[in-house]
Amino acid sequence: MRHPMHVLGSLALAGAALTVLLAPQGAQAATGTFVYHAQRDKARHDLTNPVDGRCYPVGDAHGVTGNETDRAAYLYDTPDCRGAASYFPSGFYGQQTFHSVAFIR
């Protein structure tokens, strides 16, 4: 039978290793610009080098949207990137309506 302290030490070491492996490696940014138009003022808006995993509320975006970044974008109908998302690949342009966007590596 193993000594309880050896088992606890092994579990602690395994937990520490798992924490290091699963910890975020720092915020990475997409390279490029995401372009969208606001429904209210119809003006062009840009997100340059957006950070991976961060939610960007955009208000009422409606119209031509372009993903000139090197990451896929996910467009949401909610202002907080919750719920179902529409996949918007890198290099893609199209007519879109959405309220927030997130970029995933």
Image (cartoon, grey):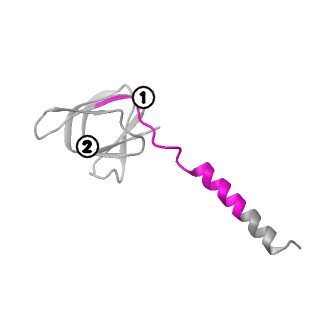
- Residue type indicated by callout 1: Asp
Task: Check the image and report above or below for 6 versus 17.
Answer: below
Q: Say whether marks 2 and 1 touch (CB < 8 Å).
A: no
SS at badge 2: strand
Between 54 and 89, the one nearer to me in the picture: 54
Kindly identify which numbered label has been placed on residue 78: none
The picture quadrant where one finds residue 46 is: top left
Q: Quadrant of the N terminus?
A: bottom right
Residue at horizontal 45 percent and vertical 38 percent from the top: 28
Q: Position of residue 5 (x, y in %)?
A: 79, 72
The disc, 2 or 1, on the residue closer to the chain's N-terminal end is 1
Magenta highlight range: 12-34
- Residue type indicated by callout 2: Phe
Residue at horizontal 86 percent and vertical 71 percent from the top: 2
Kindly identify which numbered label has been placed on residue 70: 1
Q: Position of residue 25 (x, y in %)?
A: 53, 44
Q: Is residue 9 left or right of residue 85?
A: right
Q: Position of residue 15 (x, y in %)?
A: 66, 60
Residue at horizontal 41 percent and vertical 33 percent from the top: 30
Residue at horizontal 12 percent and vertical 34 percent from the top: 42
Q: Assess whether residue 13 is covered by the magenta stretch.
A: yes
Which residue is label 2 attached to?
A: 98
Q: Position of residue 91 (x, y in %)?
A: 37, 25
Task: Check the image and report above or below for 68 versus 59.
Answer: above
